[in-house]
Image (tube, rainbow, N blue to C red):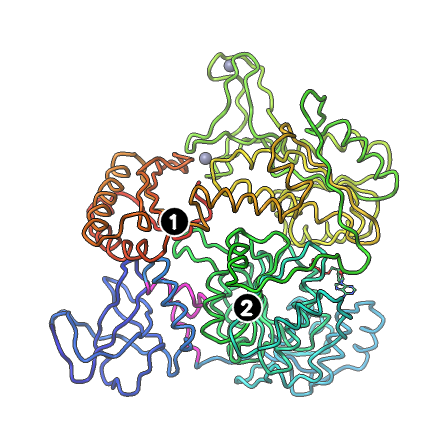
Amino acid sequence: MSANSSGILRLALPVNLRRLFDYLPPHNIHTGSLTPGVRVRVPFRNREIVGILISLETESEVPDNKLRPASEILDSNPIFSEALIKLVNWSADYYHHSIGDTFSQALPALLRQGYDLSREVHEFWQPALNLDTQAETALSRARAPRQQEAWNLIKQHQDGISSEALRSMGFDRTLLKNLANRGLIEAIEKAPEFQLFYQHEPLLKSSPLVLNNEQERALESITCEMHQFSATLLHGVTGSGKTEVYLQAIAHALANKQQALVLVPEIGLTPQTMARFRERFNVPIAVLHSGLTDRERLNGWLAARRGEAGIVIATRSGIFTPLLHPGIIIIDEEHDLSYKQQDSVRYSSRDLALYRGRLENIPVVLGSATPSLETLHNSQTHKFRYLQLQQRAGNARPPALELIDIRNQQLQGGIAPESLAAIQNTLKQGQQVLVFLNRRGYAPTLTCDNCGWLIDCLNCDAHLTLHRSPLHLHCHHCDYRQSIPNQCPNCHSPELSPVGQGTERTEEILEQIFAKKGKVDVMRIDRDSMRKKHSFQEMVEKIHKGNPAILVGTQMLAKGHHFPAVTLVVIVNADTGFFSADFRGAEKTGQLILQVAGRAGRADQPGKVLIQTGNPENPQLQTLIHQGYDAFSRDIIHQRSTIGLPPFSHIALISSEAPNSQPVEEFLNNSAHIARDIIEANNLGGPEGVIIIGPMPAPMEKRQGRIRWQLHLQARNRKPLHNLLYRLLPSMEQDPLTRKIRWSIDVDPQDMS
Ligand code: ADP
Ligand code: ZN
Ligand code: ZN
């Protein structure tokens, strides 16, 4: 125990331990000048790390001779607003993660590393001082419309316009460099000096569409009270006009001088949505995603925090973006699994958005064509407002869904004769076809024709996938690669053949059937074919030309895209997900089928969706096809309620892994034992209380050379579950076995594999 007259700093440090740390203030700094929320650099073990000041104390449990002084106070003003401090605290508490690590993850990397914000200067672009008039003429002849647009803009800003503002209008560095090379503009550095988003006149660049009645009602309901928390589910099929409602709700916020935070699953896949935002709004838009450099991320973060950006569009971690005047939060495709972080602090940014909305007193809108069952349940129990958009906006009609029985059929590239005929027909009418297959590579594995041996990964309980371009075997779980063996290691037969379909194989066969006959492009869109930076964009442009084509692709094709010439969708195999061990398998498969189906017939052409199945009697599939998502999800919700699965119970998943199973099992056995004692001592059991399931091996027991086990803690109410975790986790941290294993806790797990 020690006391210090100049005060004690209580800090959150980016380490695994679930607690705060005490330090003395740096020499010659008086704590009177400090506010919680500033960054502090401190010595920790043999290194220096950056923490966050949580509170100022007068006493510490740490003995005097152990208290060390902090090295440096990094900020003069708090880097986190009060609301964000609460949000981060809540995240650490709810997901039972180290508070310091959670704070650290909520910051852009540069700030996490201690970057000095006070030195911040900004890059501006202005007309070149020795402007050569011929350069301007040259540009106008050069047929470079984007460069011309940028030049017209910069010309009007004799004092310069910041790189950030330019980027938010879609003018990137390369383009600016090109203009500079032409001698038209030059870069200068200035101290921060910026325009607030609402000083841009007018706020809108183009006028909003006239809403239909359903959209009108939705907009009215979302915007009727902008200074108060509300949670709304906007449920509308793909193409029903949800994005238009978001755009108009955002316009409403901007007019109130409030900013909008829009979360999307993956920015790279939705350039069209980005383009729509840029066409509609005149205010700067900050776009934050993992493809940015640290510097770009920091710039976007600063633009949001200073109120330069009126709109922030971001992926998962964007939920922690500071906003000067928060006004509305929108979560598009709220059912998407990418909102849940799968390592470190395993937060759901959708759920954090709801909490943040409460803290900031603003509306939160969740949008989806296929809402998650948790969100539907929250709407049914009136925690969320429920708004439905039932018609497709404009003229588009919903696609017709049809099952194709693939039993006893001669399949080619996994495709049934009936589907091939439909493809032929569609191409003949000059339209496009989308073939969906959630398997990249050539074939899911390789087998020996003689003895039936299948090739497995050395490190994982999984088969190796055969890839053709380039030819190799690849494990999609651990990235292990090897060449194709010459013979079967089991019986030495040289006859090895691919089993099943991957996108490469389906592409190859469709090419053989269709591309040779005429001018039909077969394009494959998956992670392998899209590795190059601009390939996705190029492919999309090609598709948009609208010539007859077949697109073969994975999930990447299911998200967000408008392909107006696609009128036929073939789903190669609808079955696997329905039989998965995960209780969410059916829900996720139903969502995926409808998301893919939603790509068909977006414009004036009606769409058709053929769903191939080896199990056409599957009642869930039948309900989905004939009665739609509402009935499908209602059935699953009913089933979950009878067996007490989420959303009718809450799960915390404790996982442990190590190269051999002994410490993994022993650690979870210890944990289960402690958990039982805590449950008993604190009366946390009983029908409303916590039940312990396991320890047991994970569905994929071996992955990346490590043996994985799990312990499920499940309870009807959250409270006893969290009360158990508060007591259990600190004891688990003390177990000496933690030196031999890795372990983690996942509250509300989405992926239990
Ligand atoms: P969603 O986000 O639900 O997929 P969008 O907002 O993208 O739907 O709308 C689908 C298409 O319909 C877009 O091309 C959009 O411009 C158009 N659209 C949306 N609302 C209207 C409207 N009220 N009137 C005319 N066209 C609309
Ligand atoms: Zn063999
Ligand atoms: Zn592997």
| The quarter of the displayed image where residue 364 is located | bottom right
In magenta stretch: residue 459: no
Question: Residue 482, position in %: x, y?
Answer: 50, 31
Q: Residue at x 58, y 70 (%)?
A: 312
Q: Which mark is residue 651?
A: 1
Q: Which amino acid type is marked by label 2? A: Val
The quarter holding residue 608 reads top right
Distance between the alpha carbons at the discs numbered 2 and 1: 25 Å
Q: Is residue 487 above or below residue 63?
A: above
Q: Is residue 335 left or right of residue 136?
A: left
Is the magenta region chiefly helix, strand or loop? helix
Where is residue 632? Give x, y as percent. 60, 44
Kind of residue indicated by mark 1:
Ile
Q: Residue at x 60, y 83 (%)?
A: 257
Q: Quadrant of the N terminus?
A: bottom left
Can you say which quadrant of the picture contains the C terminus?
Answer: top left
Point out the stretch of residues depicted in magenta.
99-117
Q: Nearer the viewer, residue 589 or 63?
A: 589
Nearest the eye: 226 or 280: 226
- In the picture, measured across the screen, residue 463 lies left or right of residue 506, that is left
The answer to whether residue 542 shows anywhere in this view is no
